Image: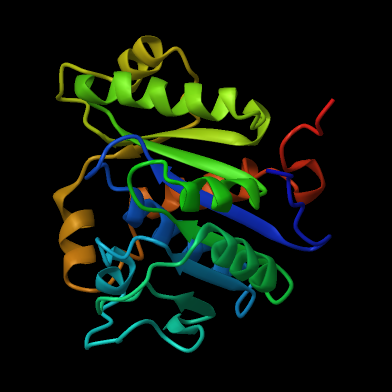
């Protein structure tokens, strides 16, 4: 697949999880919110996980959306979202996902894509159209091997390591397994460590994200310091 490079002003960030239930959607939603704080009206969050419907839940969107919304809707101040369909019907094809991300990258300054498990052709297409990849893993021993497997697949497909950020989620100082243990076992660097707090999951389940919390502060610092500039994104050119 030939690499697509987003437009000169577009930052496309695809968030994927090493395992199910790692908190990927909360990371993606919080990332989109903090980007929208800095540039209101210039951010769109795309949910490709039709099975999970997590983005809609995180923002308290209720009701039957049929085969999918006609277009983006307001999720939070300054943040638009394109939600996954909840009614039975054909899923977006990889080609449709590519066209969608290309279209949104011409309309928004930042596009954040929340993906489904596992690494399907649709997810790989989203990654191919992205400026940056955020790989989320829970800070648990069982996450190390799946995380390494995801990173190996990305390497084999030619995605550049310098556009990739590994996030250790639910880090708890009381646990016997630390983010350093995860990094060593998965042979990777962890660039963002998000604290464990039941309040984070509880807030998302109630349909809103925490405003004044170390979790959000950490994501905000990551967004301002780590995201890869658009002119450095994409796969290495063939040959």
The answer to whether residue 115 is seen in the rendering is yes
Query: Residue, x 62% and y 61% (percent of image)?
Result: 98
Residue 97 placed where, x, y %?
Answer: 55, 63
In this rendering, the answer to whether 181 lies above or below 216 is: above
Query: On the rendered structure, is 93 left or right of 51?
Result: right
The image quadrant where one finds the C terminus is top right
Determine if residue 35 is in view: no
Q: Residue at x 65, y 28 (%)?
A: 158
Instruction: Report the residue at 43% width, 51% height from top.
Output: 217
Q: Position of residue 26 (x, y in %)?
A: 33, 56
Q: Quadrant of residue 137?
A: top left
Tell me what residue is drawn at x 47 percent, y 89 percent: 70
Task: Name the image quarter holding residue 2.
Answer: top right
> Quadrant location of residue 109?
bottom right
Residue 118 sits above or below residue 213 on the image: above
Q: Going by the picture, which residue comes out furthest to the front?
A: 90
């Amino acid at each position: 697949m030939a690499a697509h490079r987003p437009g000169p002003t577009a930052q496309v960030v695809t968030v994927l999880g090493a395992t199910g239930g790692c908190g990927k959607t909360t990371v993606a939603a919080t990332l989109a919110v903090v980007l929208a704080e800095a540039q209101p009206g210039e951010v769109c969050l795309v949910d490709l996980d039709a099975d999970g419907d997590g983005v809609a839940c995180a923002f308290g969107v209720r009701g039957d959306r049929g085969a999918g919304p006609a277009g983006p809707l307001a999720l939070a101040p300054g943040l638009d979202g394109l939600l996954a369909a909840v009614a039975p019907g054909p899923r977006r094809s990889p080609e449709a996902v590519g066209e969608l991300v290309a279209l949104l990258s011409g309309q928004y300054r930042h596009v954040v894509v929340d993906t489904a498990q596992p690494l399907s052709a649709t997810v790989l297409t989203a990654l191919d159209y992205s400026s940056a990849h955020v790989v989320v893993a829970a800070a648990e021993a069982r996450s190390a091997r799946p995380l390494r497997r995801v990173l190996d697949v990305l390497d084999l497909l030619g995605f550049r390591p310098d556009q990739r950020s590994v996030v250790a989620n639910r880090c708890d100082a009381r646990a016997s397994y630390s983010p350093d243990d995860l990094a060593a076992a998965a042979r990777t660097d962890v660039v963002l460590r998000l604290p464990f707090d039941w309040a984070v999951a509880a807030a998302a389940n109630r349909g809103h994200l925490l405003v004044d919390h170390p979790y959000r502060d950490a994501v905000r610092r990551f967004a301002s310091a780590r995201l890869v500039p658009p002119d450095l994104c994409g796969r290495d050119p063939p040959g």
